[in-house]
Image: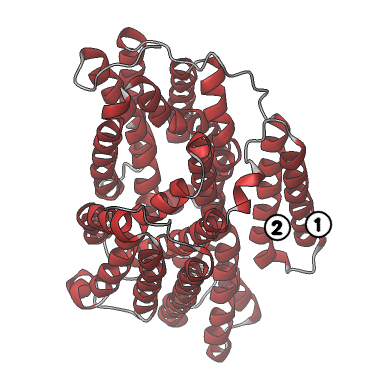
Amino acid sequence: MATVALNSKAGKWIMVSSIMASAMAFIDGTALNVVLPSLQKNLNASGTDLFWILNAYLLILAAIILVGGSLGDKLGRKKVFMAGIFVFICGSAACGFSPNVPFLIAFRVLQGFGGALMIPGSLSLISSAITQKERGKAIGTWSAFTTIVTMGGPILGGAFADAGLWRYIFFINIPIGITALIFLWRFVAESRDESVDQSIDVWGAVAIALGLACLTFGFLRAPEVGFVNWQVYAPLLGGVMLLICFVVIEKRSRYPMMPLQLFKNATFSGANLLTFFLYAGLGAGMLFMGLNLVQVQGYTQLQSGLTFLPFTILMMSVARFAGAIADKHGPKLLLVTGPAVTGAGLLILSFIKQTPGPSAYWVTFFPGIIVFGLGMSFTVAPLTAAVMGSVDEHLSGAASGVNNALTRIANVFANAVIGALAVLFFSGQLQNQVTPMKLDPQAQQSVLNQAVNLGDAKVPLIVKSSDKEKVGEAFHTSFISAYGKVMKIASGLAFIASLMALIFIKNPPKSDSS
C-alpha cells in the first residue's frame, strides 16, 4: 500500500477511524474502575469477583496482543483491525446485558480477544499508511486525542454510575465502534506487509494465557481457603509451569511473539522491569483509591472520577516537557526520579483515614494525587524513549509490543496478588474489630463472611439492632486499614521500579556535534 499524506482525505479517514477505535479501549479502561462500586452493588459481586471482572479482559489482552499485531501484518491491517473492533463491540454489548457476574466475566474475555486485535491495529495502520516524514506528527495527534478521551473516561463513568446507568460504559462502545467500522470500510485502503511470511505463535499465546489465568485463580482463591489448600497451590504451581513452558516455546520458536533476545540488552530489560513494578503499583493504587472514595469516604462516583483530573492534566502538560529532557540528556535521571516521586505520592495517600468527605479533598487526597501524578508525568515519555532506543530500528515494533503486554501483565498481577492480600488484610483487621463486641457465634461468623466484599460489606440481618452501627464502623475501619496497607505495597513497588532504573538503565551515547 502506498503511503498517504496526513492532511489528505485518506489520511484524515485513517486518523479518525484509528482514534475512534482507540477511544473505545481507553474509555473502557479508565471508566470501568470508577463504576465498580455501582457494578458491585447491582450484581451483588464480591471483591474477588471484581478482580476477575478486571483480569478476564487483561489476561487475554496481555496474552494475545502481540499475536494481534502479527496477524495484521500477515492478513491485512485493515481487515484484522475491523475484526477486532467488531468482536470488541459484540463483547461490549454482551457485557452491558450481563445478568450476573459469571456472564460478565465470560463476556469480558470476548472483549479481550477484540481488544488484542484492535489496540495494536490503530498505531500499526497509522505507521504503515502515513508518509514517514509525517508519521511522528500523526502519532502525536493520535496520542493527544486519546489523552483527552482518557481524561474524560472517569468523569463519564462517574456520571453514568451516579445516574444508575453503569451498563452504558459498555453500551457507549457500540455506536463508536460501528461508526469506525463504516469509515474503515468506505474510506480506508487495505495495508499488509507482502514480505511477511510468518507463522503465528499460537502455542506461545495459549501458554501465557493459561499460565496467567492459573496464577489469577490461585491467588484470588487463597483468602477463602488458605494457601495450603490444593485449590491454591495446584493452580499456582500449574501457572508457574505454564509460564516456564512459554519461555521455552519463545526460545525455540522461529517467529516468537516475545523475542527473548531483546532481553539481552540491559536497558531494555531494566525498562521492562520498571514497567512491571511501576504499573503493578499504579494499577493497585488507582483501583483501591477509587473504591475507598465511593464506598467509605462518601464521594459520589462522578466526584470520584473528578478526583483523578489533576493527574490527567499533569500527564498532558508535563509529559512532553519530560520527553524533551529525555531526548536532550538521556532518560536515566527521569526514570530514577519519576517512579520514586510516584512512590512518594502513593505513600502520602496511604495515610488517609476516615475523612469528612468531598469537602476535605484538597487537604486529603489532592496532595498525594499531585505528587504521584508528577512522578508518572516524569516517567511515561522517557520510559517509551528508553524502550525504543535500546533496540535496533527493525525490532522497534516487537520492543513496543512487549512493553505494552508487560503493562497488562503488571495489572493482572496487581489485581490477583494485591487483591488477594487486600481481602486477607481486611479479614484480619475485621477479626480484631469484631472479637471485643461479644457477638453470638453465628452473628460473628456472618460478619466475618462479609470480608470478601471489602468496601461493599453489608451488616448481616442476624446482627442485633444495638450492634449494627458498631459492625458498620468495623467494616469501614477494616477497609481503611486494608487500603493503607495496599497503598504502601503500591508505593514499595514504585520505589522498586526506581531501583530497576538505577541499576539497569543506561543513557545512550551522545552523538558528537561540532
The residue type indicated by label 1 comes to Ala
Of mark 2 and mark 1, the one earlier in the sequence is 2
**Which amino acid, by three-letter code, is at mark 2?**
Gly
Residue 201 versus residue 411 in the image, above or below: above
- Residue 458 visible in rendering: no
Which of 44 and 213 lies nearest the eye of the viewer? 213
Q: Position of residue 111 (x, y in %)?
A: 50, 33
Where's residue 43, x and y in %? 48, 47
If the image is split into quadrants, where does the N terminus sit? top left
Instruction: Classify 10 Å Cα crowding around label 2: few (below 14), some (14-19), many (20 and above).
Output: many
**CA distance for labels 2 and 1:** 8 Å
Residue placed under numbered mark 1 in the picture = 234
Q: In this view, does 271 lie above or below 22?
A: below
Q: Residue 428, image x and y in percent?
A: 59, 80
Callout count: 2
Are discs 2 and 1 less than 8 Å apart at CB? Answer: yes
The residue that disc 2 covers is 218
Circle 1 packing at 10 Å, graded few (<14), some (14-19), many (20+), is some
Closer to the camera, 154 or 99?
A: 154
